[in-house]
Amino acid sequence: MQQVTLPRKLVNQVLAHAQSCPQQEVCGLLSAKNGTPARVYKIPNAATDPAVLFDMHAPALIQAFKEIRERGERLFAIYHSHPGSAPRPSAADQAQLAYPQALYLIVSLDEQGVLQLNGFRCTDETTSTLEQVELVITE
Ligand SMILES: [Zn+2]
């Protein structure tokens, strides 16, 4: 399994975002600077049914990409939460992979009350098949 290293500080921000809104999916971006994960950008969920879907609010997404560019960062990962299901890509997630080059992080709040975080990457930009990666959390 491919390994991806994430700083604990950023992981904690993503988990806290998911916990702050346990009835709905939350979503956002992680940027990287010089290849190192750098910053979390929370994006409001504009989906019509945010309990089971996410759709990043377009103006907020554009603003986040602007800030990423201005800081000399790049898109590293897209994260969202699953309030009521396992941290695996849903059929809807597979169908809307807008950024096949990004890491996909999914937080689950449901498994025995323990927060879980899984990472997935597209094996092939044309087939949009997500394959799990091993997340290595560093201090
Ligand atoms: Zn999902």
Image: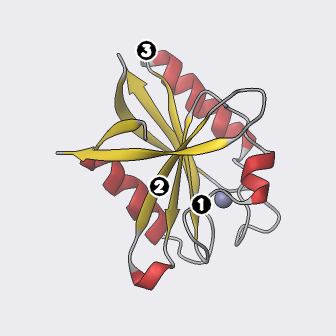
Does residue 3 lie above or below 87 as drawn?
A: above
Ligand 1 visible in quadrant: bottom right
Residue at image location 57% in from the left, 70% down from the top: 86
Residue drawn at x 77%, y 33% is: 127
- Total count of labels: 3
Quadrant assignment, res 26:
bottom right
Vertical comparison of 125 with 15: above or below: above
Using the image as rendered, state which of residue 56 and residue 133 is in the foreground.
Answer: 133
Q: Position of residue 70 (x, y in %)?
A: 48, 17
Q: Amino acid at mark 3?
A: Gly
Q: Is residue 3 above or below residue 14?
A: above
Q: Are marks 2 and 3 in contact (CB under 8 Å)?
A: no
Q: Dot 2: what SS? A: strand
Taking the spot 63% from the left edge, 53% from the top edge, the residue there is: 44
Check disc 1 and report its element: helix, strand or loop: loop
Eye-nearest disc, 2 or 3: 2
